[in-house]
Amino acid sequence: MRIRRIAGREDIRAILEVHARAWRAAYSDILPDETIEQEADSDPDPEHVEDRYSRLWPVRDRVFVAEADGVVRALFIYETRNLA
């Protein structure tokens, strides 16, 4: 598995797909299918990808993906704060 920073819109699309899989795995027994479908779009349209791109690209130095066999399997976004 390789961990790297996001590289562009294709990574954003892959992040949305990972998010959808995670939602389905975590909430399919708890939430109605309609709610999951709203929150977990496994085939995001170009507008959704562009929206997330505009939010994540400015902080791309803090957004990482884990890739296995050329497929994004996980994501990690971190934030630094002064906790003192």
Image (cartoon, grey):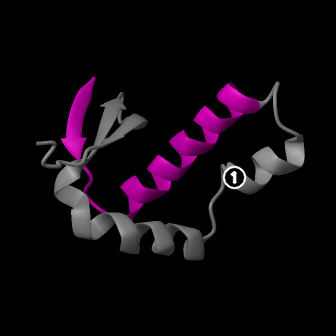
Q: Is residue 11 above or below residue 46?
A: above
Q: Is residue 31 above or below residue 6?
A: above
Q: Which residue is at 49% across, 73% downward?
A: 51
Magenta stretch prevailing secondary structure? helix
In the picture provided, is 71 more to the left or to the right than 46?
Answer: left
In this figure, which residue is indicated by the disc labeled 1?
Answer: 39
Amino acid at circle 1? Glu
Say if the magenta span includes residue 7. Answer: yes
Start-end of magenta stretch: 1-27
Quadrant location of the C terminus in the rendered image: top left
Say if the magenta span includes residue 74. Answer: no
Residue 17 location, x and y as percent?
56, 46
Q: Nearer the viewer, residue 23 or 70?
A: 23
Q: Is residue 71 above or below residue 1?
A: below
Residue 40 location, x and y as percent?
68, 48
In the picture provided, is 25 more to the left or to the right than 56?
Answer: right
In the picture provided, is 60 more to the left or to the right than 23?
Answer: left
Q: Is residue 1 above or below residue 41?
A: above
Q: Nearer the viewer, residue 4 or 58?
A: 58
